[in-house]
Image (cartoon, rainbow, N blue to C red):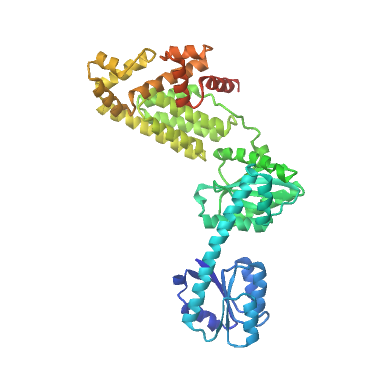
Amino acid sequence: MYNVFLVDDEPLIIDGLKVLIPWKDLDLQVIGTAHNGKEALKKLEESPCDILLTDIKMPEMDGLALINRLKRVHPGTKCVVLSGFQEFEYVKEGLSLGIENYLLKPVNEQELMSTLRNAVEKLEKSSVDEEAYFVLRDNTIWRWLNEDIDSKEWRDRLELYQLQFDECDTTVLVIQLMENDSLGSEELYTLRTHIEKKLENVCIVNPEGEFVVLVTSHNQEECSKKIKTIEVLLEQEGIDYFIFKGSTVAYMNECYQSLSVAKKLTSFRLLLKGSCVISEDDMNPYKEGYIENHESIQQIIKWVVTKESSQAIKEVKRIIKEFGNQVSFISPHGIQSFAIELVTSIQTEVMKHPSEKITEYVREIISVQSLGNLEDLLVSYIESTVRHLQEQSENGSPIIQSVLKFIQEHYHEEQSLKTLSQKFHVNSIYLGQLFHKETGYIFSDYLNQLRIHHAKELLKDTYNKVGDIGKQVGYSDSTYFYKQFKKIIGVTPKEYRLLALQKTAK
């Protein structure tokens, strides 16, 4: 919906226009009125309009002077003149200012509505063109910040988009809005434009929907004032935010370094609760890496296996609360590592959820943006796991229960559906179908998951050769062991051992 502002020194004219025109049907709304050009200009400085309807002859400032002044600041405003004087000079000057139409009073309703429709069509086309321009411009700047554009193309684009960067101290800000303040593309670009105008610095919207601002300044005091300006603007809009402040660099071609710092800081959003500005100094107390919570994880697993979901959930909430109190100053990466280990350990011990579901939970853990959301996610996982166990105990086949128990004890030996079917006196095809139905796993996938789990423990707790560990868990072919380990864990056995040693060292 586009905004209309009415200006006329006769109140009856303004009141008449308000009721004469079906504004909503034209996708328009009247946002304000004034009785002379001076009053209108003052109001429009605070709340710009898309379409201006103005009289010509008014006290203090006439309509043509108002249009002239307004066009300098907001050249895209569509202006319509309503006048009781059919004088050629007025018409000529109005046309030179780019007015949409010069209508004589008393106003013909149909003619005015036709003029307004044409103005709306132009605004819509202009809006599409402008948004496309900014999308391309923002993409170019984002590529430059990520060192993904060659110098010739960058110079050409600078000229095309009429961009000019001053060589002075620059600080890159990454601004994220809180989930409840997610904006549509049109609102994002409007807010971006406001930030650019207030700071007189470049502000883009990156592919993740974050604002990225290049704050130029001559000293830290000036930089802080500009950041405060952004905070005030966002607060006035009623938007909750996180501003991640990169390092200050002396040259524009070093902006990628500042962006890198700001992007690393975004992971700390997990620990933040409200609108704030975060810099590198704020995060120095936090330790990177692993959280030693092995005993808690094992206890939670026991409660899950015994279907005591309330106890397991209570312990998860206690741990999350401890993270929130920042008792150990643990980094977001450490918290995510704990959550992933908890979920994958439950999966390995219980082995009742399809692997696709686990992958989904791990993906959500990595992208979670608050401790509250992480707690909800883990509670949901525990509840669904316990429900699955309860259903299985009620409906599960005794044969599959026996097979699972046997495999847990003999995973390191050669196993197949054929040997198991002979042992438990059932048809191998039937056993495979029943196994998949009750566990959600194809038998070979289940066996590989179980073997790789035990291989992980041996890689962490022993110094045995990788090939020997493969044989210990049931893989006679070391190449196949490497392939399965990389497929399931995402890294090679050697890489996993190195990562485990690094975590232990920390």
* Image x and y of residue 458, in percent: 48, 15
* Quadrant in which the C terminus is drawn: top right
Choose top left, top right, bottom left or bottom right for residue 160.
bottom right
| 379 or 397: nearer the viewer | 397
Is 172 placed left or right of 267 in the picture? right
* Image x and y of residue 8, in percent: 59, 80
Which residue is drawn at the image coordinates 58% and 87% (left, top)?
Answer: 84
* Image x and y of residue 497, in percent: 54, 19
Which residue is drawn at the image coordinates 66% and 59% (left, top)?
Answer: 197
Residue 201, relative to residue 397: is it above or below?
below
* Image x and y of residue 229, in percent: 66, 54
Q: How many marks?
A: 0
| 441 or 398: nearer the viewer | 441
Choose top left, top right, bottom left or bottom right for residue 315.
top left
Q: Let me know if residue 237 appears in the view.
A: no
Q: Let me know if residue 305 appears in the view.
A: yes
Which residue is drawn at the image coordinates 61% and 47% (left, top)?
Answer: 142
| 481 or 396: nearer the viewer | 481
